[in-house]
Image: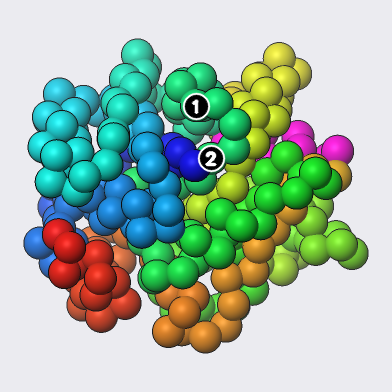
């Protein structure tokens, strides 16, 4: 299986710490390296990384990382990295045949979350989103989180930053099929801006957006969105504890 990592945006909330969000170190290891190594640990054979802001620096780092980590990494540069993140998904998905793990460059996960997610495919879904039902998780920034409301099957009924009520928070990892990029294109054709959530809602409206609950045990379901200095400080403290194999390999 391939993985697709979105790493094109500016990352203005971390700009005070680093000019490139993907290259921002967490306890000495850049975020993009944590993502690639997590994908490899989950069984991924090839990683496509969509670059944009600071593309030259990120792509140079990826070439070195590919040799060090022993995994093929393909950089796909997007022309306008200010566009919504769904445009990055479409650009990266064009380099992938079949299903893939979709990850955000600023999200980190403990061992097992991604490997369990990779086994959640089925004919009844076009995408499966990792969710956390612990909506009061102190590591989640409620002002920046993407929320999820579920239907009776546990599939997505609604997704977005401003929906209410909601049942879970989006963890930033997906098992995607080619339907996801097609859904983003369809949402754009219908007048949407082209965010990933637009494509997810398009699939949800058609009953094709499933979920995977990461679970309640902090030792096996830990995850973080490292999106601002507060979260970065917490990640520096917690990531080596919850990602010991990743840090040992790096």
Q: Is residue 126 above or below residue 160?
A: above
Label 1: which secondary element: loop
Locate residue 113, reporting x and y percent. 49, 66
In three-dimensional space, the C-alpha distance between marks 1 and 2, rounded to whole angstroms, equals 8 Å
Res 154 label: none
In the image, which residues are magenta?
Answer: 196-206
Residue beneath disc 1:
96
Secondary structure mostly seen in the magenta stretch: helix
Residue at image location 89% in from the left, 64% down from the top: 152
Label 2: which secondary element: strand
Which colour scheme appears in the figure? rainbow
Residue at image location 57% in from the left, 59% down from the top: 117
The image quarter in which residue 242 lies: bottom left
238 to the left or right of 219: left
Q: Is residue 181 above or below residue 107?
A: above
Is residue 13 among what the camera can see? no
Quadrant location of the C terminus in the rendered image: bottom left
Mark 2, other Cα within 10 Å: few <14 / some 14–19 / many ≥20: many
Residue at image location 36% in from the left, 37% down from the top: 47
Question: In front here: 82 or 235?
Answer: 235
Q: Is residue 42 magenta?
A: no
The answer to whether the residues at label 1 and label 2 have Cβ atoms under 8 Å apart is yes
Mark 1, other Cα within 10 Å: few <14 / some 14–19 / many ≥20: some
Locate residue 84, reporting x and y percent. 49, 29
Is residue 41 among what the camera can see? yes
Residue at image location 24% in from the left, 75% down from the top: 244
The image quarter in which residue 166 lies: bottom right
43 to the left or right of 135: left
Q: Residue furthest right?
A: 152
Locate residue 66, reporting x and y percent. 19, 39
Residue beneath disc 2:
100
């Amino acid at each position: 299986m391939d993985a697709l990592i979105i790493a094109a945006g500016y990352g203005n909330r971390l700009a005070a710490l680093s000019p490139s969000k993907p290259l921002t170190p967490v306890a000495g290891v850049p975020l993009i390296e944590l993502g690639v190594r997590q994908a490899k640990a989950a069984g991924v054979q090839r990683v496509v990384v969509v670059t944009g802001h600071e593309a030259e620096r990120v792509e140079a780092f990826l070439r070195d990382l590919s040799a060090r980590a022993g995994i093929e990494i393909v950089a796909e540069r997007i022309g306008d990295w200010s566009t919504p993140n769904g445009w990055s998904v479409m650009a990266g998905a064009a380099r992938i045949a079949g299903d893939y793990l979709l990850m955000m460059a600023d999200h980190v996960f403990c061992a097992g979350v991604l490997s369990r997610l990779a086994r959640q495919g089925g004919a009844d879904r076009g995408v499966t989103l990792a969710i956390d039902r612990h909506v009061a998780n102190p590591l989640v920034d409620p002002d920046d989180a993407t929320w999820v409301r579920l239907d009776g099957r546990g599939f997505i009924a609604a997704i977005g930053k401003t929906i209410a009520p909601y049942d879970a928070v989006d963890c930033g990892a997906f098992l995607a099929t080619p339907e996801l990029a097609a859904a983003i294109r369809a949402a754009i054709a219908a007048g949407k801006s082209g965010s990933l959530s637009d494509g997810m809602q398009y699939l949800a409206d058609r009953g094709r957006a499933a979920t995977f609950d990461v679970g309640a045990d902090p030792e096996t379901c830990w995850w973080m969105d490292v999106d601002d200095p507060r979260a970065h400080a917490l990640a520096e403290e917690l990531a080596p504890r919850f990602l010991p194999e990743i840090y040992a390999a790096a």
